[in-house]
Image (spheres, helix red, strand yellow):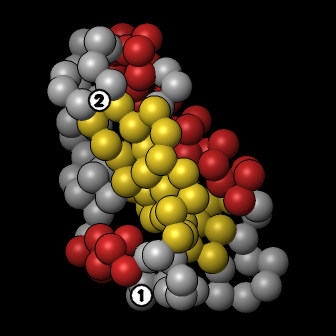
Amino acid sequence: MKHKTINVLILEGKEPGEGWSAQCLEYDIAMQAKSMTDLMYEVYRVLLGNFIVSKELGVEPFASLKRAPPVYWQLFDQAKTTVCREPIPFGAEINSDSSEVVVRVAESQFQPA
């Protein structure tokens, strides 16, 4: 497996207290949580879970998942705030190549229909 970058878009809920959503772009995976801290935990939990199960099954991680719809890619490109850009901490255990997660927060509270 080659170097893999997983871009994650973070969207704030429309109403106060509605929570946060995350959308992976390369793979159409979405997560939700009440706080940003809980959301980041969910992002890593879902990614790690997919890596581990894929390794056990002997398949490429995320191989069966399509890319997120174009609207999320547009929002990610327009987002000016990069929250983190870091190596996936569990990547070395899964393969010898490096992987990283890039997280950006959208400026708007856009919620697709």
Three-letter residue code for mark 1: Ala
Tags 2 and 1 touching, CB below 8 Å: no
Q: Is residue 91 above or below residue 96?
A: below
Within 10 Å of disc 2 (Cα), the crowding (few <14, some 14-19, many 20+) is some
22 sits left or right of 29 in the view? right
Q: Nearer the viewer, residue 106 or 83?
A: 83
Q: What residue do we see at 29% from left, 63% from top?
A: 68
> Which is nearer the N-term, disc 2 or disc 1?
2
| Whole-percent x, y for residue 25 in the image | 33, 58
Q: Is residue 108 above or below residue 12?
A: below
Q: Nearer the viewer, residue 15 or 73?
A: 73
Q: Which residue is mark 2?
A: 61
CA–CA distance in space, label 2 to label 1: 29 Å
Q: Is residue 85 above or below residue 99?
A: below
Within 10 Å of disc 1 (Cα), the crowding (few <14, some 14-19, many 20+) is few
Q: Quadrant of residue 73?
A: bottom left
Q: Which residue is mark 1?
A: 113
Q: What residue do we see at 47% from left, 76% from top?
A: 80
12 sits left or right of 111 in the view? right
| Whole-percent x, y for residue 20 in the image | 65, 68
Q: What residue do we see at 37% from left, 54% from top?
A: 7
Q: Which mark is residue 24?
A: none
